[in-house]
Amino acid sequence: MQLSRDELLKAYTTMRTIREFEERLHVEFATGEIPGFVHLYAGEEASGVGVCMHLDDRDRIASTHRGHGHCIAKGCDVDGMMAEIYGRKDGLCAGKGGSMHIADLDKGMMGANGIVGGGPPLICGAGLAAKQLGTGGVAIAFVGDGGSNQGTTFESLNLASVWNLPCIFVIENNGYAESTSSKWSIACDDAADRASGFNMPGVVIDGHDFFAVYEAAGEAIKRAREGGGPSLLECKLNRYYGHFEGDAQTYRGPDEVKKLRESRDCLAMFRERVTEAGLLDASDLDAIDSEAEAQIDGAVAKAKVAPPPTAADLLTDVYVSY
Amino acid sequence: MARTATYQQAINEALAQEMERDETVVVMGEDVAGGLGTDGERDAWGGPLGITKGLYGKYGDRVMDTPISESAFIGAAVGAATAGLRPVAELMFIDFMGVCFDQIFNQAAKFRYMFGGKAETPVVIRTMYGAGLRAAAQHSQCLYPVFTHIPGLKVVTPATPYDAKGLLIQAIRDNDPVIFCEHKGLYTLEGDVPEEPYALPFGEANIVREGDDVSIVTLGRMVHVADEAASALANDGIECEIVDLRTTSPLDEDTVIETVENTGRLVVLDEAHPRCNMATDIAAMVCEKAFDSLKGPIKQVTAPHTPVPFSDTLEDLYIPDAAAVQKAVKAVMESSK
Ligand SMILES: Cc1ncc(C[n+]2csc(CCOP(=O)(O)OP(=O)(O)O)c2C)c(N)n1
Ligand SMILES: [Mg+2]
C-alpha cells in the first residue's frame, strides 16, 4: 500500500504527538498535579495510528483504559484531552470523565473505557448501525491482551461473525495485563489463533512497525467496508511505562524497556524506513518533533491554568438530580 | 499496649491467619500475587493496591492469579465453594460486578434456598468501593445496596481496621456467600487491631459514639465523616449518637431502633446514591417500626443522583461531607418537637 508524502507526514505527526503527550504526562503525573489513574500508551503508537489512518468520521472506535493514543489517532482535540486529564471544565468531557473516559462521538471516538472488555460489544453495535444505515462505516475495538480473555470479547467476536458486521477487533498485545504475562494468560500461542474459531481472519502483526499495521488494517477495513465481515488483528508491541503511573514494575526484566526503546521503537523504525527509502527527509521529521513538543507544551500550559468545573456542573448531564 | 495496624494490614492479616488455620481457604483474583509468567518478580503486586501482597510467598499455589475473566473466576470461586473449598475471590473494584453479576446473584445467592437448604456456598468476594480517589465513574461507586437487595447474600462494610479483620475472618468462616466491601479511602487508616485471630458476628451494629440528641446511622467511610460532624456539633451543645451498621445484610434493626428510641431524632448518612440505598432502607424501617419514637422528620444525607465525577472539584462536592451532616443534624433538631 503506497502512502503519499502527506500521509507519511500525517502518520509520523500523529505518532509523535501521542509520544510527546504521554512522555509529558509521565513527567507531570510525578508532580502530583494530575488526579486519578493514568495509563500511558507510549511505545504502542504504531498500532493506533496504523489502524486509524484508514478511518474517517463515519467510522467508530472503542478504546480501553489506555486510551490517549487512540483518541489522538482518531482526531480528538489534544488541548481538550489534556484539559480533561487535568479535570477542567473545558476538557473534552467537561472534566467529568478523566483519562479513562475521554470520548468524542463527533469524531467517532466512543470512549476510553474503565471496564476491561467494555468496548467490543459496543463496537458490534456501532458496526450494526453502520450496516443498517448503509453509511459504509466500520467499527473498531481496541482490546488489550488481558481484555482478550474477557467473556464480552469472545461473545462479541462471535456476534460480529454471525451478524457479518463491519467490525475489526485489534488486540494490542503488549505482553502484560497489569503485572501478568500474556504468555501465561492467553491459553493458545497467539490471541489471533482464536479468530478461526469465530470463522474470521486472524493476523499477527509486528505492532512496532507502522507499515505492517497500516497494511494489515487496510486489508481488514477494506473487507469490512465491502461487506466481507469482521477480522481480528493482533499487534505485538510493548508499553514503555508501568501499567499505570506509579507502578514499580518489578515484574519486568532488568533493562527490558531500555532495550525495547533502543531496538523496537516505532518512531525510530519509521524514521529509518522513510529516510532510507528517500520518502521523507530527516529535517521533515525533526520539524515535526519540535512542533509536537511545542503543541504539548501549549496543551499542558493551558490545562494547568484552565478553570475547574463549577458546583452547578455536578448536577447537569443526568436526567434527574435528587 | 494494643498493637496498631492499618485497614489494609488488617485485611491481609485476616487472610493469612485464615489460610493458616484452614487449608481449604484459597485466594484468587487478578494480580493477587502478580508477575505470573514474567521474567521479573513473582508476587509483584498483591492486587493493584498491594492488599494481598506476601500471601503468595507464604501459601504458594493457594494464591491464584486469574486472567481478566470475572464471570469465569468469580463463578469458579462460587462453584468451588459448593465443592469443598473456601475461596476468597477478589473482584478488584465493586464496579466490575457488572461483568460477573449473574454468578453472584443468580448462582451463589440462590443455591441454599433454591436447592431446599441442601447447598452451602462459603465464598467471600472481596471488593473495593467508594469515591475519593479521583478514579471516576467506573471505579468509584458504592454499590453495596445492590447486593443488599438480594436475599442469600451477606454484605459487609467495615469502617475500621479492627472491624475489617474481625469481619473478614467471620466472612471466611461463614457458610453463606459474603460480599466484603472495602472502602478504598480507608486502606491507610490506622487503629487498634489485636494480633490474634478473632471473628466479629454479622448483624451487630456498633455504637461508635454515644449521645442523646440525634442519632446518625451510617456505614463504611461515612462513619468517620459522621464522627467529624459530631465533634463539631458537640461544640454547639448537640450530642450525636453514631451507629455504624457494619453489615447491611444481615441488618441490625434492633440497635437502630434503640438509638431512635433514645434520641427521637434520626439522620441517615450513606455515600451511595439517594434512591434505594441504605439511607432509604433505614428510614423506611424506622418509620415502620419506631415511628412513635420520632420527634420529627428523618433526614437523609447521601451522594447526589449522578455518576461519580472525575474532576477533583466535582468529586469533593459529590461525596457527603461533615458540613452536610452538621446541616442535616441541625435541621432535624429544629424541625423536631
Ligand atoms: C472488568 C475489569 N476487570 C479488571 C479491571 C482492572 N484492570 C484495568 S486494566 C487491567 C489490565 C488490562 O490489561 P490489557 O487488557 O492487556 O491492557 P493493557 O493495560 O496492557 O493496555 C486490569 C486488570 C478493569 N478495569 N475492568
Ligand atoms: Mg496488555
Image: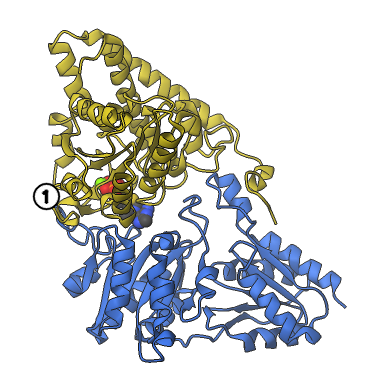
Q: Is residue A272 above or below residue B252?
A: above
Q: Position of residue A261 (x, y in %)?
A: 18, 32
Q: Position of residue B36 (x, y in %)?
A: 18, 58
Tell me the element at label 1.
loop
The residue closer to the viewer here, A9 or A83, is A9
Horizontally, residue B228 falls left or right of residue A41, namely right
Question: Where does label 1 land, which residue?
Answer: A189
Colour of the chain lettered A: yellow
Crowd tier of the residue under label 1, counting other residues whose Cα lies within 10 Å: few below 14, some 14–19, many 20 or above: few
The residue closer to the viewer here, A82 or B166, is A82
Quadrant (top left/top right/bottom left/bottom right) for the C terminus of chain A: bottom right
Residue at image location 21% in from the left, 14% down from the top? A2
Residue at image location 41% in from the left, 49% down from the top? A114
Name which quarter of the figure residue A4 lies in. top left
Amino acid under label 1?
Answer: Asp
Q: Position of residue B262 (x, y in %)?
A: 74, 87
Is the C-beta of the residue carrying label 1 under 8 Å from the nearest atom of ligand 2?
no
Q: Chain of mark 1?
A: A
Horizontally, residue B166 falls left or right of residue B217, namely left
Quadrant (top left/top right/bottom left/bottom right) for the N terminus of chain A: top left
Residue B307 visible in the displayed image: yes
Colour mapping? by chain
Q: Is residue A20 above or below residue A118?
A: above
Residue B2 visible in the displayed image: no
Q: Which chain is assigned blue? A: B
Q: Position of residue B327 (x, y in %)?
A: 75, 63
Residue at image location 64% in from the left, 47% down from the top? A314
Total numbered circles? 1
